[in-house]
Amino acid sequence: MTPVELSRTVLHAVRCAVDDGELSVTVPERVVVTEPGPGGCGDFATNVALQLARPAGQPPRRVAEILRERLVGADGIRDVVVTGPGFLNITLEAQADPVTGLVREIRDRGAEYGHGDALAGKVVALRVPYEVRAEVVADAVVRIVATQGGRATVEHAEPVNLRPVPAPEDPAPLGPDAAQWALLHPAPHDRPRITADHLVQRESNPLFRVRYAHARIRSLSRNAARLGFTAEPGPVHIDRGNGAIDAHVPIDADVVIDTGINTESDVGSTTGNTPHPLLTPLADHPRILAAAATHRAPDRLARHLVTVADAVLPFLPCVLPCGEEKPSAAHRARLALAEAAGTVLAGGLSLLGIDAPEHL
């Protein structure tokens, strides 16, 4: 069961409790599941009971117990424990591998991973001033709203309802990709920086990290093909003791760039109950897209892409075999996970109107 599937299962439990008259609330559009916090247990946790308690007129723990009764018997769930004021801590069946399931879902949906129906049938009317940043933000919002089943229209009329802080100068000299990023990455209330920093190919430049991560992933796929293997979702095991995570020189020299990023970071192991560092940002992508569409905030998507890139970059050196290693199921699984991150990065950049390079 993937985090997205678990979120839908919890949402179904809420609907059932409402239909049975045990909860008198408006069913939320979505439920967020995360890794358990301090004092929690299991594989995932959700605070949906705390969110519903006030409108339901019941104590949070009572709401949590109502939902627990419906979740315990659900497919793929082994146990549910209520902790603290009303957190639901969910343990999945032992055979469930959230990373494998998530990677399969991303591979199946491709560029449409994260698309939903949060705005299905709705028309979002954007009224913007004659200003370059407002135009660029509105253009991105149109694409993002479409991912959630809605339709956005743009016009220059009063009263204006989309007015980000204007750019201090013309961003055109930065080039199309850097100009888009310079205007979309900051929050709407922040003044964008129109500087050459957006062109620097170093770790300090978040746009570079995102595009570099995508280019590295595409390079790994090409190099894997030359070694005679392709991606196949499966458990991702990483063992620093065998040298599998040592940095190595990719075959494609055109993507070897000194970023200053520490490629020998300990990315951990996914054995046991330890979640892979990429699990949360990849699983969170549908929620981020829905929030960006609902709040007309492409900056949320831009910052999320930075999070995905920063999570995947330390993982990439261990994807391909090193030295005398032969390609194995572990390498195929690692490549599948890396390609899933690449799919999210490419899809997000496209929605922002920015090119996702094959080479960098």
Image: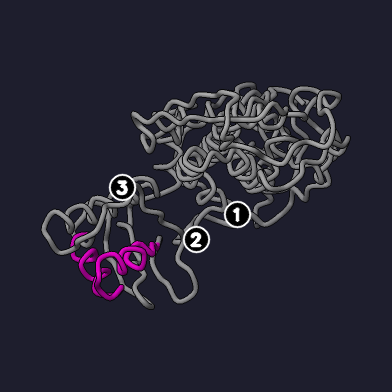
Q: Are marks 1 and 2 in contact (CB under 8 Å)?
A: no
Most frequent secondary structure within the magenta stretch: helix
Q: Earlier in the sequence, mark 3 or mark 2?
A: 3
Q: Which mark is residue 239?
A: 1
Q: Position of residue 289 (x, y in %)?
A: 50, 39
Q: Residue at x 76, y 40 (%)?
A: 248
Residue 8 shows which numbered tag?
A: 3
Label 3 vs 1, first from the N-terminus:
3
Residue that appears at 47% across and 33% down: 232
Do tag 3 and tag 1 residues touch (Cβ < 8 Å)?
Answer: no
What's the residue type where badge 2 is placed? Thr
Q: CA distance from mark 1 to mark 2?
A: 13 Å
Percent across and percent down for residue 158 are: 57, 31
Which disc number belongs to residue 309?
Answer: none
User: How many circles with numbers are drawn on the protein?
Assistant: 3
Q: Mark 1 vs mark 2: which is more N-terminal?
A: 1
Residue at image coords 77%, 26% = 360
On screen, 110 above or below 18? above
Q: Residue furthest front?
A: 158
Residue stretch rendered in magenta on the structure: 45-70
- Tell me the distance, in whole angstroms, between the alpha carbons under discs 3 and 1: 33 Å
Q: Which residue is mark 2?
A: 274
In the picture, measured across the screen, residue 258 lies left or right of residue 49, that is: right
Amino acid, disc 3: Arg
Left/right of residue 64 with respect to residue 317 in the rendered view: left
